[in-house]
Amino acid sequence: MDVGELNRIVAQISAFSPALPMVVAGVLVFRKTLDKKMMPIVALLIASFLSDQFALWLARTYQNSMPASHLYGFLHAVILFWFFCQVIPESKKLVIVIGASYLVLYVLNSAFNETIFTYNSLAKVVQNLTFISVAFWYFFDVYRSEDIPSLEKSGIFWAVVAIFIYHSGALFTHLLSSKILNTGGFFGSWVIHNLFNITKNLLFGMALWISRIR
């Protein structure tokens, strides 16, 4: 099996990986046991699933899939800033300022620099660094808390772990995107990116289940 075929298989698995945690979310909604603080995670899973299906459709019809990537990148950021506003309430104003500043820069970058028909690696690198930093801030907030919860029983904690792991892995892909595109190693690195995405979605499913209202 060559790298291209491996990438196609992993990409298909990655594109459908939000389905399982979406089923978990559906069960919790049906049972009325979904923690409202996890609603942004559910929204992110739905946005991810629809975006991936749209991108696959564009690829199958031999169209440029970058517009789908730009749109999802924007929605991804909006939803995660919404999530962190809820889980770090003491720093909500700071998260809003950071979020608004980033989203303005993202739109300007897509309009004038890395346009919607090109791979916006610069915007994604900044996004990865931003959410790695915000996740660290959440971990620090938990550490300095006088009443540290049982983290293994905290769905929010595992959701933030998923966000941190994904953006750390994605940072590697996006930082090296221009170099690996020129050396032909892009597809191999994209396998790694998709594996991190699958891991993130599986952790989201676990986080949703752990956080259910008992």
Image: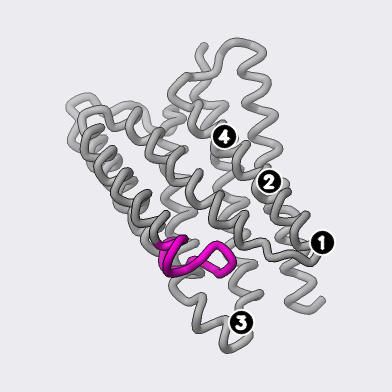
CA gap, disc 4 and disc 3:
33 Å
Q: Position of residue 130 (x, y in %)?
A: 33, 54
For marks 3 and 1, give the one nearer the viewer.
1
Identify which amino acid the numbered label 2 is placed on: Ser
The residue that label 4 is drawn on is 206
> What residue is at 23 percent from the left and 42 percent from the top?
140
Tell me the kind of residue under disc 4: Met
| Label 3 crowd bin: few (<14), some (14–19), many (20+), radius 10 Å | some
Q: Please report the bounds of the magenta region as a residue range.
A: 109-124
Label 1 SS: loop
Q: Can you tell which quarter of the image residue 63 is in?
A: bottom right
Left or right: residue 206 versus residue 153 is: right
Secondary-structure class at tag 2: loop
Residue where numbered disc 1 is placed? 61
Q: Secondary structure at mark 4?
A: helix
The residue under label 1 is which amino acid type?
A: Thr
